[in-house]
Every structure is written in C-alpha cells, then in structure tokens.
Image (tube, rainbow, N blue to C red):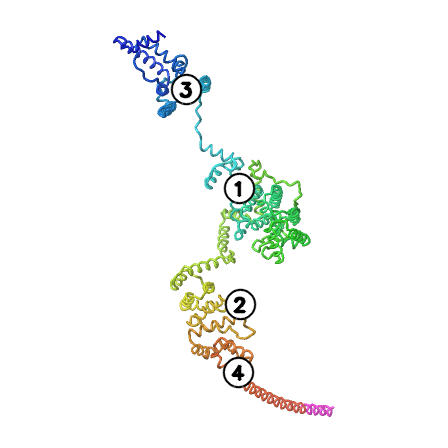
C-alpha cells in the first residue's frame, strides 16, 4: 500500500522535460508496431476493428508510472463488469489472432459505426481491386465468416485445398443451332415454337426421310394438324373437315386423335354431338379409332366414378351417350352405366344419370323400351323416397316431362349431323365390366418406326380408297410428256371441253341470302331518315331475283316494332316509285303475307296492315292485290278478318270514305273487288255487308244492299227465263221427233217397194 501511494504521488507531481521526450519516443514505437499489425491484415477489417475497439484517450504519463498505472487500471477494469470483455480481448490481442465478434455497446453511435465498418468490410471482400495483398498464383478461396475461430480456420483450409486441387475449367461455347435441334428431337413438346415455313425448310433439308429427325418433325406436324382440325370443327364445316382428317395418317396418330377429341369434348360439352358425328364417320372406315376412343372413355369413367369426380363423369357419360346414338357403342353399355349410377343413388349420381338419359333417352326408348321403362321406374322410386336434394328432385320431374314430350328437344341425332347410314355403321360391343380393356397409352408418344416409308405408302393407298382420289393427274402428265402431235391436239381438245363439262356448284345452304338479310337489317337499324336508308340500301348492289328479300326484310322489321312507324312506309314507297320491279316485289310480298297472316300476333298484324295501307293509299303498289281476298266465312280466318279491318280503316282515314268508295266502285276495279263484295251467293253477300257494317264502313256496301234487295226479283226473272228456255227446247224436241218419224216411215215404204220389185223380177 505504501508503494502504491508513493506511485500515485509521483504520478500527480509535474513531469520533467526528459520524461516527456521518453514518452513521445515510446508512443512512436507503439504506433510502428500497430502499423505492422495493420499491414498483416485486410485494410478495411483492421480499420473497422481499430475504430470499434480503440481504447479511450488517456493523459500522458511518465514511463516510470505508466506500467504501474496500466496494471492497476487493468485490475480495476477486470473487476468491473463493463470492462471485463474489453480487458480479455486486449490481453489476448498479443497472444492470438484477433477475434471477429463485435463489442456490445449500448450507445447508438457505436452501433452505426459497426454497421458502417461491416459494409466497408463486405465491399472490400467483394472487390479484389481494393485489396493491397499480393495475389498468389493459385486461386484465392472465399473467406469464411464464423464466430468460432477454430472452425473458421479449418473451413478456410479445406476450401483452399479444394480450389488448388480442382482448378476451374472453362465451359465450351454453346452452339445455338445444335441446342435447338437437340431440344426439338429430345423434348416431349418439341421445344420452342418453330414457324411452319421454318419447319418445312428443316424437313426439306433432311435428305433421309426415314431418319429419326424427320420422323420427329412429321410426328409434331401430325399432332398439330389433328389438334387444329378438332378445335375448329362445328356443325357447318364438319363435311369439309372430315376429308382433311382422312388426309392425315390416322392409323399412326389414332392415339393423338383420341386424346385431342376427348380433351376438346371435356372443354366444350355443347359440341359433343359434333365430335360424336366425326367419330361415327371415321369409325366406318377405321374401326380401330372408334374402339380405342370407346375403350379410353370406359376406363376414364371407371376411374372418375371411383374418385367421385363429378365433372369428368358428366363429360364422359355425355360422350358415351352420343356415341350410342350414333351406333358406335352398343346400347348395353348405356344401360350398364344407368344401372351403376342408380344402384346407390346420391345427389351427384342421380344428376349424372338424368343428364345421361336426356341425351340418349330417345335412342334407348326406340331400341330397348322395356329397359328404359325400368330405368324410369327407378327414377320414380328415388323421387318418392325423397332422400335426395330438392334440386335433384326437380331435375327428375323435368325428366319425366321431357319423356312425356317424347324427347322433342333432345333428338338422338340432329338432322345436320345425320351423315352416316345405319347399315354402314360398325358397332362395338364393349361393356362396363370388361377387364381386358387396353387404352394403348403408348400411341400418344413418339417412337421410331423402322418401316416408316412403307407404312406411309400404305396409308396413302388407304386414303385414295377412302376419298376416291385417282391418279388422273399423273396420267395426264405422262400423256402430256409424249412428243406426238396427235396426243397434243387430243389433250388440247380435252382442255377445251373441260370448262364446259365442269359441274356447276349451287349453294343450297342460303348463306348468301342470310348474309344479305343481315346486311339489310343492320342498314335499316343504323339509318336516321328514310332517304339515308334508301340510299344505303341501293348501294348494296342487290342482284336480280333478290328484290323480294329486301321487301320481306322491310316488312319483317316493321312488324317487330311496338307501334307502326311511318319510316318503313316511306322506304317502301320510295322503292316502289323508283322502279316497277320493286313495286312488283312488294305486291308479291303482300300476297305471301296474306297467306301466312294467321301466324302473326295482333301487334305484328296491325303494323303490317298499316304498312300496306300506306303503300296502297300512296299508289305505290297496284290495287290489283285485292284480287286475292275472298271475303266469306269459309275462306277467311279471324286473323285475316282483323288484317282486312285495319287495312280498310287506314285507307278510309287517309283517303276518306267517299274517295275510297269511288276507287273501289270504278269499272276497272270490278274484277279485282269481286271477292271483297261477293254477289255469287246471298249468304256471302250478307256476310260481306255485315262485316263492313261492323267495322263502321257500311257506306261501301250500298250497291251490295241494292243487289240483295233486288235479288228475289232477279231470281224470279231468272227462273222465268229458264222455264221459257225449257219450253222452247221441248217444242223443238217434239218437232224434231215428229220429223224423224215421218222420215223413217217414208224410208220403210221405199224399202218395202224395192222388196216387191225384187220379188216380181224373180
């Protein structure tokens, strides 16, 4: 203790000048040792560590008291918890390499400085340009950061040995063309997309047609062609798609065909009848395609039924039902599916069964009525049990109503899809219980065919037999290659006859007429005034014979309005006054409309009657159209009488009753109005008078009333004339009979005289 107190007193006493100089030299030696340690380490790491672990500044002390003070301060700091970790690190600094753990400080400034030092350390490790260390000829292994120094050194040693023993090898340069070719030949989907023109060029560049590369490209082309044709087939183009399908190798690609059509049918259920019709046509020529598809559908239905996959079951049963309608599948398969679905009824199974029997119920009722009746009885029992959902019960009730209507909304085969004759179809007798069904999944995967060219030639012969393609073109080419003048002249003669002998193809689908009607309708609906509409319609360049289509379309548009619009009447009037052909077309339209007027409802009937009333009142069409009207009880209906009523009321409002009566009673209209004002029978006359009186147009029947009033006198005079003519006829008959008797008597006497003369001569 005495020594310590003396040392403290000596330290507090003022320092002499020589002791300050010794202290400065001591500091210089210490800074030189620190520089050597810094150069042995990474600059950024040493800088960050010196910042984070530099001891606080102390006052300058003399060399005699510096060692004692350092010992006392180290002892006191080791005893205090705040400086315990720092003292350990400072003591171990001289013996072992510096540890890489951070000092825990509570101040925020030290934390920010530590984060900055760490970022600078990471940047210095990433960028080798900043390192002042000399690079060794071997590869520098990456530095390992670990809290445990022993583990860190061992890991660095292992990485250094690995990098030095196994140097990096430079990769070869990638050949893009070779990679694409390899991808095309080895990958399942053909790799990246290749345009068709580029694909054809690649096929043409391959000289060996039986090579694996060419077969792979042909396989991809076959798959794309089948998928494209299946995706675009519909009711209107099915007859043109089927020859294109036969032009592809369906024997080699039957697996692709079945997979593509099953996928397309599952994605679009409303097109199931179309796909079934396509398979029905292909099945007549290639039954193996239909059998393979039916096998896969049965296996798919089994798997989906076991997994409770409702969506797949609906799609599969719908396809099987339409194949049964097309006679590709036997009805036993359909009945087995119904029995399986209704054996243990659930909501889903009954719903699938209802949809299934709606699709093929008409066909099953025709071919096996007893089994179909048993299925419907089972439906009735399920409905009476009431253990299923209300929604499914309503579906069963709707099914019974469909059966009562004889499946009129669900025919077995649509008329436009009835392509195959019944005797040409091939039916496959596959059942749901067959255990030897082979789906042939390998048909959908590319395989090298060693006899590729021979098989392709065989299919070309089959295609010619199916499509009826002959080698006439080849024969013509061979005959044209001869050098004889006679052959050339003969070929020229055939060429000259060729265009005359070609078959004229007539479009009976009415596609052009439908497009014309659509254009007319859109033109009318898009016009504001009737002049604009007429101008646009005249620009359509309507051909001869199609004027009636325009007239019918204008009348149809007029009838669809809620009330009559004068816009349509002005359009018809403008057309009729423009050319006589249009007037005749509207007159023909009047006759056709009057024949089917019983099919119109009241609103449409009123609009049409006012439309033709406008045309008649404006003299756009001739009044000769009244010649088709026979106003009597037998030849008219309630609709036609309403039409005549509205027509004449409109004429009376437009022309007036007096002018209308004058037009109808004119001598030139006598023949045309004979049916409107009949005089052949008192009953018809009385009916016409009562009709026009009931519609407040009794003034038009004045002449008919006079005729009916004078009819008894006329009939009496007619009878007298008939009796007089009969009397005169009888008198003339008696005179003629007496004259004939006298002639006969004279001839008899002459004959008797001749006989007597002959006897005398004898």
Q: CA distance from mark 1 to mark 2?
A: 56 Å
Figure quadrant of residue 170: top left
Say which label, 1 or 2, has the lower sequence index. Answer: 1
Identify the disc placed on residue 708.
4
Q: Is residue 236 above or below residue 727?
A: above
Single out the mark in the foreground, 3 or 2.
3
Say which label, 3 or 1, has the lower sequence index. Answer: 3
Say which label, 1 or 4, has the lower sequence index. Answer: 1
From the top left corner, tell me how far across and down residue 662 is, in percent: 44, 79
Secondary element type, mark 3: loop
Single out the mark in the foreground, 4 or 3.
3
Give the labeled residue for mark 3: 100
Identify the disc placed on residue 598.
2
Q: CA distance from mark 3 to mark 1?
A: 64 Å
Give the labeled residue for mark 1: 223
Q: Residue at x 35, y 12 (%)?
A: 70
Which residues fall within the magenta stretch? 747-762
Single out the mark in the foreground, 1 or 2.
2
Say which label, 4 or 3, has the lower sequence index. Answer: 3
Q: Main secondary structure of the magenta part?
A: helix
Tell me whether the residue at label 4 lies in contact with that at label 2, contact meaning CB atoms closer than 8 angstroms.
Answer: no
Q: CA distance from mark 4 to mark 2?
A: 31 Å
Secondary element type, mark 1: helix
Q: Is residue 754 magenta?
A: yes
Secondary element type, mark 4: helix
Tell me whether the residue at label 1 lies in contact with that at label 4, contact meaning CB atoms closer than 8 angstroms.
Answer: no
Single out the mark in the foreground, 1 or 4.
4
């Amino acid at each position: 203790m005495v020594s310590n107190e003396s040392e403290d007193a000596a330290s507090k006493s003022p320092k002499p000048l020589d002791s300050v100089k010794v202290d400065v030299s001591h500091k210089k030696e210490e800074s030189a040792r620190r520089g050597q340690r810094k150069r042995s380490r990474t600059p950024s790491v040493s800088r960050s560590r010196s910042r984070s672990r530099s001891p606080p500044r102390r006052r300058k002390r003399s060399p005699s008291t510096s060692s004692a003070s350092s010992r006392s301060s180290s002892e006191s700091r080791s005893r205090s918890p705040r400086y315990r970790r720092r003292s350990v690190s400072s003591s171990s600094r001289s013996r072992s390499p510096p540890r890489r753990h951070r000092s825990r400080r509570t101040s925020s400034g030290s934390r920010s400085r530590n984060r900055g030092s760490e970022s600078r350390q990471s940047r210095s490790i990433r960028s080798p340009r900043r390192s002042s260390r000399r690079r060794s000829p071997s590869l520098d292994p990456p530095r390992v950061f670990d809290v445990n120094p022993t583990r860190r050194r061992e890991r660095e040693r292992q990485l250094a040995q690995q990098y030095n023993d196994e140097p990096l090898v430079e990769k070869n340069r990638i050949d893009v063309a070779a990679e694409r070719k390899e991808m095309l030949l080895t990958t399942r989907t053909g790799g990246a997309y290749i345009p068709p023109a580029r694909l054809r060029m690649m096929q043409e560049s391959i000289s060996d047609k039986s090579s694996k590369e060419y077969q792979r490209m042909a396989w991809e082309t076959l798959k794309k062609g089948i998928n494209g044709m299946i995706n675009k087939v519909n009711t209107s183009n099915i007859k043109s798609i089927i020859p294109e399908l036969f032009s592809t190798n369906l024997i080699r690609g039957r697996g692709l065909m079945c997979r593509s059509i099953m996928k397309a049918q599952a994605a679009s259920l409303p097109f199931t009848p179309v796909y079934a019709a396509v398979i029905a046509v292909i099945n007549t020529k290639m039954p193996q395609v239909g059998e393979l598809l039916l096998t896969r559908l049965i296996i798919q239905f089994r798997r989906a039924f076991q997994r409770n996959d409702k969506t797949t079951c609906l799609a599969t049963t719908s396809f099987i039902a339409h194949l049964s309608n097309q006679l590709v599948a036997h009805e036993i398969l359909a009945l087995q599916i119904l029995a399986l679905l209704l054996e243990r009824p659930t909501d889903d199974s009954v719903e699938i069964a209802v949809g299934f029997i709606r699709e093929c119920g008409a066909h099953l009722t025709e071919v096996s009525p007893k089994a179909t009746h048993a299925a419907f009885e089972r439906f009735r029992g399920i409905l009476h049990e009431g253990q299923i959902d209300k929604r499914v019960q309503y579906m069963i009730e709707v099914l019974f109503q469909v059966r009562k209507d004889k499946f009129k909304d669900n025919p077995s085969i649509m008329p436009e899809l009835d392509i195959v004759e019944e005797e040409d179809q091939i039916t496959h007798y596959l059942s749901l219980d067959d255990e030897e069904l082979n789906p042939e999944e390998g048909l959908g995967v590319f395989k090298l065919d060693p006899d590729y060219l021979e098989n392709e030639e065989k299919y070309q012969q089959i295609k010619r037999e199916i499509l009826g393609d002959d080698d006439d073109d080849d024969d013509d080419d061979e005959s044209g290659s001869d050098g004889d003048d006679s052959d050339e002249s003969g070929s020229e003669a055939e060429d000259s006859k060729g265009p005359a002998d070609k078959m004229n193809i007539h479009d009976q689908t009415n596609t052009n007429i439908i497009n014309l009607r659509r254009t007319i309708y859109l033109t009318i609906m898009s016009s504001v005034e009737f002049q604009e509409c007429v101008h646009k319609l005249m620009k359509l360049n309507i051909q001869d014979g199609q004027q009636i289509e325009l007239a019918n379309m204008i009348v149809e548009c007029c009838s669809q309005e809620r009330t009559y619009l004068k816009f349509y009447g002005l359009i018809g009037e403008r057309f009729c006054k423009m050319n006589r052909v249009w007037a005749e077309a509207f007159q023909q339209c009047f006759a056709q409309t009057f024949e089917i007027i019983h099919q119109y409802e009241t609103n449409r009937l009123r609009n049409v009657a006012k439309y033709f009333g406008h045309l008649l009142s404006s003299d756009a069409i001739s009044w000769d159209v009244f010649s088709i009207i026979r106003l009597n009880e037998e030849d008219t209906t309630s609709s036609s009488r309403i039409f005549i009523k509205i027509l004449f009321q409109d004429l009376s409002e437009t022309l007036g009753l007096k002018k209308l009566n004058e037009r109808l009673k004119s001598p030139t209209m006598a023949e045309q109005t004979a049916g409107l004002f009949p005089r052949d029978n008192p009953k018809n006359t009385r009916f016409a008078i009562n009709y026009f009186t009931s519609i407040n147009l009794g003034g038009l029947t004045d002449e008919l009333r006079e005729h009916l009033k004078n009819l008894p006198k006329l009939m009496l005079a007619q009878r007298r004339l008939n009796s007089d003519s009969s009397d005169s006829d009888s008198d003339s008959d008696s005179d003629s009979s007496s004259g004939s008797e006298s002639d006969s008597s004279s001839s008899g006497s002459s004959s008797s005289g001749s006989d007597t003369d002959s006897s005398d001569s004898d």
